[in-house]
Amino acid sequence: MKKANSVQNAMDKGQVYYAGLGGPGSQMIGEEEEKEVVEVIRSRILARDRFEKVRQFYKVRTFEDKFGEYMGAKHALGVVNATQGLVIAMAALGIGPGDEVIVPAYTFIATAAAVVAVRAVPILAEVDASLGLDPADVEAKITDRTKCILPVHMKGAPCRMDELVEIKNKHNLKMVEDVAQACGGSYQGKKLGTFGDAGVFSFDFWKVITTGGGGMIITNDYNVYKTCVHYHDHGHEVYRQNEDLGERPLIGLNFRMEELEGAMGLAQLAKLDYIVATMRKNSRILWEAVKDIDLFVQRDIPDMAGDIGNGLTLILKTPELGKAFSQKLAARGVEREWLRESGWHNYANWKQILKKKTISQDGCPFTCPRYSGRVEYYAGMCPQTDDILARTVTICYNNLLHINDAEMQELILKIRTICKELKA
Ligand SMILES: Cc1ncc(COP(=O)(O)O)c(C=O)c1O
């Protein structure tokens, strides 16, 4: 994709603004976002559709087109966020009461909550050293109620897509990919989000690119796209032009992305290649400088070329080493995350899911007459995931876009010193 000159200039000058809070996209907010957003404000048209006689542009539609093109998907639909995007995509694929959806035990809670929102039952499967779904455990968890597999590409790296797609095909299942944390990532040259029936992205403030809040659904199936459009906008047709009364294909709600987010998205998408290339380069430099240390291995990335490099994720030999390594990094001021303590990314902390506390008083979907299974959740139910999370530490998940040479050397020295201490 050709970048606007001003974007290129800003990147050449390395203009990264790090507030210490948000994800990579937020660190690149600059003149380009300002220009796009101001254009929308000056147009005074903040809605994604309609006003066709007076408007001069459609930011959301253009963002959708460019995003779809970038990902190599036929259709893209901007939505309010990824959580709801997952709900819409699953609903459009016909997933509902009585169905089971296999989700990883390591993902943000929203993935499992979205399954409950369509009144299906999340079945937790183990992750392996890739931090993505373990194909063997997915296969083991399949029942005659399984309708969908939901791989989540955590921390910028692809899951084992060959094997997962094979399982999907073998059992004739649907697949929705949660790409919230891996926008721009790929597997064997194909962009993440294009392997299943739909892929869902997040543009919240902590993500690879951001619109503040927002998400995108991509699919190659026009019928799925159309149903997503209907459901996400009161049943209205694609690119609606009016408010005519009359019957709609289905009862929809409102989960639209609107023009201000679309404008942000356009400016951010133009920076995605730069963000990914920079993080990838820096994460490789960091790994090359520490890979001789025998206390850890890098997480198992099924396709290195497709990793976007937002952080370096290391798996230590024991949980004790994982904890100590993380504590020592923190004591030296290094941005790090010990995955065991990654809050609502660890299923053991999903208290309301473990206790099946849904909004419906009667406990639907778990008690739904259409559901013939029985599921129990408890901390400890995924021992392989527990073990991996307890041994895994991610370094610099937000820093790698702007780290300079001196900071990199200092970081490498800190890691080496810590490892010497751990061995002593
Ligand atoms: C893996 C994963 N899925 C889904 C979401 C939900 O994204 P959103 O904030 O856009 O609803 C997140 C956000 O943190 C996430 O990390």
Image (spheres, rainbow, N blue to C red):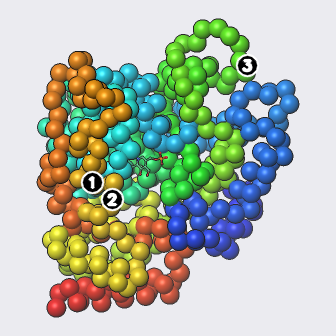
What residue is rendered at 65% in x and 62% in y?
29
Amino acid on which the number 1 mark rests in the picture = Asn
Q: In the rendered image, which residue does mark 1 sit on?
A: 349
Q: Quadrant of residue 120?
A: top left
Q: Badge 3 local density, few (<14 within 10 Å), some, or many (20+)?
A: few
Q: Are marks 2 and 1 in contact (CB under 8 Å)?
A: yes
State yes or no: Cβ of the residue under disc 2 lies below 8 Å from any atom of ligand 1.
no
First-in-chain label (1 vs 3): 3
Please indicate whether residue 279 sits to the left or right of residue 14 in the image.
left
Please indicate whether residue 257 sits to the left or right of residue 142 in the image.
right
Residue 242 numbered mark, or none = 3
What residue is rendered at 16% in x and 26% in y?
373
Q: In the rendered image, which residue does mark 2 sit on?
A: 343
Label 3 sits on a secondary structure element that is loop
> Mark 1 and mark 3: span between their CA atoms?
46 Å
Amino acid on which the number 3 mark rests in the picture = Asn
Q: Nearer the viewer, mark 1 or mark 3?
A: 1
